[in-house]
């Protein structure tokens, strides 16, 4: 399969290099003391390219006026449903992956705009988290948890 994205991405990177990012993949939810709690796999290093989301697209999605906190993100992606970056994915009880940027900001993937993971890439819409977040990280094989520990990633995201 011809991967046009790979060809174009090289040209884009000549002017706007890919950013080094971390992804926290949603691996499902568990009932913890009566509260449904989302869990995430440990961070993995990835490359991506943030771009502005157009006003017309945001207006169409009833997100007008949020162009300061919403971005498109082009990512290299596997076609494996369990590991590719994704928003909410009901068949696997995934609640949306988080991206950590180079400045320590967190972005929630809220939509998959273009899924060409069969060709090795996808474009996602992500929203900047304006308040501190806590991600529950599952360590170990196959997402087995010793017992839930909220791995505090609480820190100010904005100066």
Image (spheres, rainbow, N blue to C red):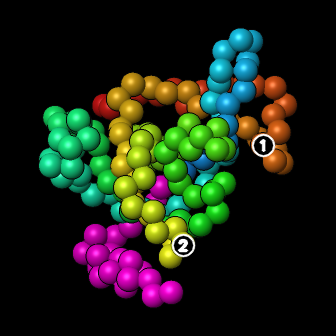
Residue at x 78%, y 43% (from the top left corner): 143
Q: Is residue 100 visible?
A: no
Q: Is residue 117 magenta?
A: no
- For residue 61, what is the image quadrant? top left
* Percent x, y of residue 151: 65, 29
* Percent x, y of residue 89: 56, 44
Q: Nearer the viewer, mark 2 or mark 1?
A: 2
Residue density around tag 1, few if under 14, some if 14–19, many if 20 or more, within 10 Å: some
- For residue 26, what is the image quadrant? top right
Q: Is residue 10 magenta?
A: yes
Give the residues in magenta.
1-21
Upstream in sequence: badge 2 or badge 1: 2
Label 1: which residue? 143
Label 2: which residue? 118
Residue at x 20%, y 43% (from the top left corner): 60
Whole-angstrom CA distance, mark 2 to mark 1, is 25 Å
């Amino acid at each position: 399969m011809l991967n046009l994205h790979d060809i174009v991405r090289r040209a884009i990177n000549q002017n706007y290099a890919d950013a080094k990012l971390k992804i926290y993949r949603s691996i499902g939810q568990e009932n913890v003391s009566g509260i449904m709690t989302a869990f995430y796999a440990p961070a993995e290093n990835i490359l991506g390219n943030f771009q502005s989301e157009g006003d017309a697209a945001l207006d169409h999605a009833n997100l007008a006026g949020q162009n300061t906190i919403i971005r498109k993100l082009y990512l290299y992606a596997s076609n494996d449903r369990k590991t590719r970056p994704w928003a909410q994915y009901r068949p696997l009880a995934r609640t949306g992956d988080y991206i950590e940027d180079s400045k320590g900001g967190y972005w929630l993937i809220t939509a998959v705009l273009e899924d060409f993971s069969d060709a090795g890439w996808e474009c996602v819409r992500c929203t900047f988290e304006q308040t501190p977040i806590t991600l529950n990280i599952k360590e170990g094989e196959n997402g087995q948890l010793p017992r839930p520990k909220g791995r505090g990633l609480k820190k100010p995201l904005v100066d």
